[in-house]
Amino acid sequence: MEKLKIKIATLGYIPFKIGFSKIIKWKSSIFEVDKSIDEYKIKLDSDTEFWGYSDKTIEKELPTNSGFDFLIAITNVPLEDKYYARRFSGNRICITFADVLEYMRYETIKLENYILRNIYRYSLVYLMYGNRIPVQYEKTNFTHDDTRKCLFDMNGNKTELIYSLDKPKICIECKHKLSGQIDQKVPDKIINTVEKEIKRIKKNRFQKINEFVKTNPVLSLFLTFLAGIVMSLIGTWLYELLRILICEK
Ligand SMILES: [Zn+2]
């Protein structure tokens, strides 16, 4: 299979830094992301509750997808029905950081994990629907309501989104769906490759340590104390060793 060609764009002002270079450089046998991340302003005002934007408005604001298998627009405005992702005509998807950013920050999850997780999710959606992204109002069943750390978790409760942003999986039910329960069969080779590649969507060592300190504050304090004593002992021992060596000369 030829690699899927994906375009990433930003829609509206993004007031925080996203490491797009990591996404562009991400090594995948399934897709390649265009090196240029285009920025687009939002001209229209919000038109739904809580300063959200309806699909009708986002559809007007989205750039055209020309020459790519699909386009993902990243925004920070709330989308219709407070979804974190909506699907539009012309193989375009809009994903938002509204309401999900704070959970990622609290869990020290890199923002790029969220984008990569969605790139894999919609790459498989594109393949299982016969090389197209079904629009939002089309009846689909590629998600499940319960949270399984799976690429296809619905995450109606957005606090649970974080579970599929650190080593996400494809659950058994979704594997069956990918093997032919929806429009097109996705070859096993692709499913296996995706499973291997998404293991690299994970927290780094610093984030793991941070998580350990948050969940084990007393033990962390004790370990810091212990490390202090050990360092002090090593320092004393080195001092004595140097003193003996110098005196012997
Ligand atoms: Zn699943």
Image (cartoon, rainbow, N blue to C red):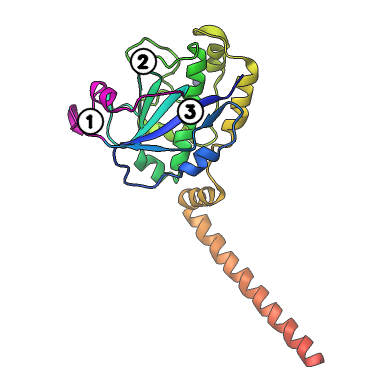
Q: Mark 2 or mark 1, which is nearer the start of the sequence?
A: 1
Q: Is residue 225 above or below residue 164?
A: below
Dot 3 and dot 2 residues touching (CB under 8 Å): no
> Does the magenta portion include 208?
no
The residue at which mark 1 appears reads as: 52
Q: Nearer the viewer, mark 3 or mark 2?
A: 3
Q: Is residue 233 above or below residue 89?
A: below
Mark 1 to mark 3 CA distance (whole Å): 26 Å
Majority secondary structure of magenta residues: loop
Q: Nearer the viewer, mark 1 or mark 3?
A: 3
The residue at which mark 3 appears reads as: 6
In screen coordinates, is 163 left or right of 60? Answer: right
Ligand 1 within 8 Å of disc 3? The answer is no
Residue 149 appears in view? no
Q: Is residue 4 above or below residue 237?
A: above
Mark 3 to mark 2 CA distance (whole Å): 17 Å
Which quadrant is home to the N terminus?
A: top right
Which quadrant is home to the C terminus?
A: bottom right
Q: Amino acid at mark 3?
A: Ile
Q: Which residues are magenta?
A: 42-67
Q: Quadrant of residue 39?
A: top left
> Does the magenta portion include 43?
yes
SS class, disc 2: loop
The residue at which mark 2 appears reads as: 135
Residue at 49%, 37% in the rendered image:
35
Which residue is most to the front?
A: 67
Residue 102 appears in view? yes
Pinpoint residue 155: horizontal percent, then vertical percent.
39, 26
Mark 1 to mark 2 CA distance (whole Å): 19 Å
